[in-house]
Image (cartoon, rainbow, N blue to C red):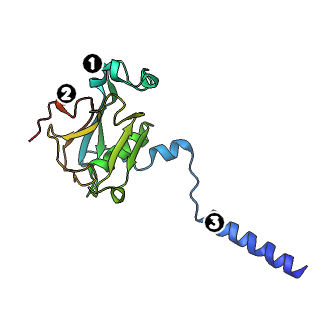
Amino acid sequence: MKKDLLVLAFIILLIAIVASGTKIQSVDEYYLTHIDEITEDSETVTISIRCDTILDNWDKLSPQLRSEKYVPKDGVILEETEYVLRPGDTVFDILDRAVRHNRIHMEFQGADKNSYNSVYIQGINFLYEFSCGPLSGWMYSVNGKFPDYGVSKYVLKDGDVIEFNYTCDLGRDLGYEFK
C-alpha cells in the first residue's frame, strides 16, 4: 500500500513538472509567434512569395496541383508584406515568420542535412522542386539580386526586399543569368 502511494505521488509530481514546463498555445497563438508590431523606430524588411511562372507552364504542372488552392490566379501566394527586422535575422528567419503568420505550408531541409550548410527550401504552398518540370523549384532574391548562397546564410539589413519566386526554368524565367 505504501509503495503504491509513493508511486502515485511520484507520478503526480512528474506530471506537475512536465505541465509547468510546457507552454500550451492555441492555434492562433502558435501562428502569431514571433510577430512584432511595427513602430516608428522599427527596422523592417519586406517579403513576397510568387509562383507566376507556373501560369505560363500550366501543362508541366503536376495534375494534383492544378488548383487555385496551390496556384492563385494572379500567381501571388503572399503579397509584399513588411516584417520587423531583428539583429542577425536571415532570409530564412523572415520566411519562417511570414509563412507561420499567414498559415502557408512550407517544408525545408535543415542546414545540417546538406553539403551547403544552409537551409534548403523544398516546398512552399505544396509546390516543390520538380512540381512543374525538371528545372523547377524555389529561388529567392534580395533587392533584385539572386545570392549564390542559401537562405539561412543571408543576413538582412534594414529596408531589404525579399522575393521568393517559383521557377520553371532554373531561374531563366525570372531573369537570372548564369555566370
Provide residue 131's location: percent of width, then percent of height.
37, 31
Provide residue 106's location: percent of width, then percent of height.
41, 41
* 62, above or below 11, in the image: above
129 and 87: which is toward the camera = 129
* 32, above or below 70, in the image: below
125 and 83: which is toward the camera = 125
Name the image quarter holding the C terminus. Answer: top left
- How far is mark 2 from mark 3, CA to CA? 52 Å
**Tag 1: amino acid:** Asp
The answer to whether residue 80 shows anywhere in this view is no
Direction bottom: furthest residue: 2
Give the residue at mark 3: 18
Give the residue at mark 2: 173
Earlier residue among tags 3 and 1: 3
**Tag 3: amino acid:** Val
Name the image quarter holding the N terminus. Answer: bottom right
- How far is mark 3 from mark 1, CA to CA? 53 Å
Provide residue 53's location: percent of width, then percent of height.
26, 24
| Label at residue 124 | none
**Which element is circle 3 on?**
helix
Direction right: furthest residue: 1
Give the residue at mark 1: 56
- How far is mark 1 from mark 2, CA to CA? 10 Å
Q: Which residue shows up at 31% across the image and 28% down it? A: 51
Q: Which residue shows up at 33% across the image and 28% down it? A: 132
**Tag 2: amino acid:** Asp
Earlier residue among tags 2 and 3: 3
Q: Given contact means CB atoms under 8 Å apart, are the residues at marks 3 and 1 in contact?
A: no
